Image (spheres, rainbow, N blue to C red):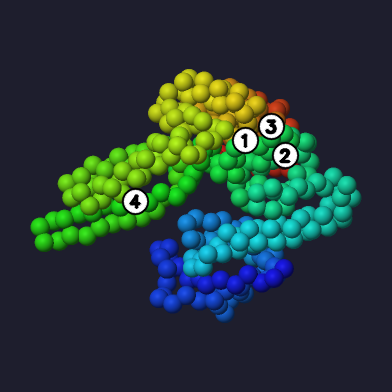
Amino acid sequence: MNPIRFKFRFLDDNGREAGFLSKRGSFDGTNLELGKETVPIIAVLRADKRFDRILLTLLAEDGAVSHAAFAVKTKNLHELLTALNRETSARWAVLRQEQLDKEGGGEKLRFRLCPYCEATVDLTNFGETPQIYCNFCDTIATVQGTPPKHEPAHALCDDCGYFSRPREFSTFYFYFLLVIYGWRQGKRYVCPGCMRGEAWKMLFLNLPFLLGVPFALIQLFRVYFSDRIGWKSSFAGLDAANVKARKGKWEPAIRSYVEICRSVSDYSGIRYNAGLALLAKGDAVAAATQFENALALCCNHAPSYNNACTCLEQSGQTGRLGELRTLWGEAGEPEAQV
């Protein structure tokens, strides 16, 4: 591949950009050059993006996992992120092939490219399902039938954990105390439901000084109305349903999830949300059914698997729990993602 060249800045321990001048970096498909430092692509497990930062999950020779992050100061951040995950997933797929060949099970290997980020998704041991989960871009991709509108924009929210449409929101607060004045601003990557409280807080705290009011009104518009004007998703009503679930209104939330599933011919992400709502309600048996329904639609949806294991264990369904763990090649305790 042609080298991707970019400018970047390292981050300090507090996540702030270090230094005033940007450094030069490049990625040629084999090595990621960050100034004088070289990171071989085979040491990268995955790359994530938040705002203008790329977050790397790295694997050392001794098996230890570490993390590194840097801020990209050029406009090719998405190109770099896609290339990193495309190349590292392809190389890990080759190693997976070699491992299974040595074990005499190479014919079981099955991979599929994510239609949204081009990463190689390992589907070995899983059956065919209408959807697949890409653990590199954290999206559910429809591979059989017509994908829902704006499918790749939906993922799990960092704050509430529900399947939604997380996006970047900005916060701004202006203050004036006699002779002292200033402002505070920041960014959040959350779903509109999680941002509602922050948007109203911005409006009320900025009202006395007016300067921050227009900014707060823009965020309120994005939270409540941007999906209704000029951006119509196949998952209409999803934000409202998630807010109901978070407020403990489980039955109305689940009814809303059922209606959304009808509009998109059933969907694993929505089934996952129904499982979270039922788990929060305390009904582990019904929640396990919803998580397993999600897996029937998307065979490798790791968040559904983790929560299904938790629910099956809580409800004493040890037989089904063992079958599920065997399918996933897991021997230890799963980590719940609630």
Where does label 3 land, which residue?
Answer: 297
User: What amino acid is labelled 4 in the image?
Assistant: Thr
Where does label 4 land, which residue?
Answer: 171
Residue 58 in the image: x percent, y percent? 61, 62
User: What amino acid is labelled 3 in the image?
Assistant: Leu
- Total numbered labels: 4
Front-lying residue, 169 or 31: 169
User: What amino acid is labelled 1 in the image?
Assistant: Pro
| Mark 1 touches mark 4? (CB < 8 Å) | no
Label 3 residue SS: helix
Residue drawn at x 44%, y 30% is: 240
Whether residue 199 sits left or right of residue 61 in the image: it is left
| Mark 2 touches mark 3? (CB < 8 Å) | no
Label 1 residue SS: loop
Q: CA distance from mark 2 to mark 1?
A: 11 Å
Where does label 2 land, which residue?
Answer: 143
Whether residue 259 sits left or right of residue 145 in the image: it is left
